[in-house]
Image: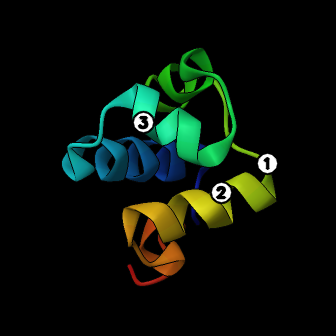
Amino acid sequence: MITLKQIQIKLAEAIKLSGMPQAELARLLGVSQSLISHYLHGNKMPALDTFANLCKILDVDTNDILCINE
């Protein structure tokens, strides 16, 4: 069973591995930098459209983030 915590961890890892500054990522997504910080700390999950755009910007497979391939 896939849990929200697993998805949050994968998302945070993808953001960290990208090496992209939070401010730049926030600008590209059209969200606040503090919201990116919430994603990194597992306090919030992005809306579905933001999640899709985030995966596209980070060039990661949504299936990997959603733990579909595990």
Say which of marks 1 and 3 sits in front: 3
Quadrant for the C terminus in the image: bottom left
Distance (Cα) linking label 2 and label 3: 16 Å
Residue of label 2: 51
Residue 66 location, quadrant = bottom right
Q: Secondary structure at mark 2?
A: helix
Residue at (39% x, 53% y) in the render: 10
Disc 3 residue type?
Answer: Glu
Find residue 51 and report its horizontal and vertical position in percent.
65, 57
Asked if the residue at tag 1 contacts the one at tag 2, i.e. Cβ–Cβ closer than 8 Å, the answer is yes
Q: Residue lying furthest top in this view?
A: 34
Mark 2 vs mark 3: give the one in front.
3
Residue 35: quarter of image = top right
- Marker disc for residue 24: 3
* Residue found 42% across the figure and 84% down from its top: 69
- Callout 2 crowding tier (Cα within 10 Å): few <14, some 14–19, many ≥20: some
52 sits to left or right of 26: right
Q: Kindly identify the residue that appears in the image at 53 percent across and 29 percent down.
A: 36
Residue 13 at what x, y percent from top left?
30, 46
Residue type at mark 1? Ala
For label 3, the SS is helix
For image coordinates 33% across by 53% down, the residue present is 14
Residue under pointer 1: 47
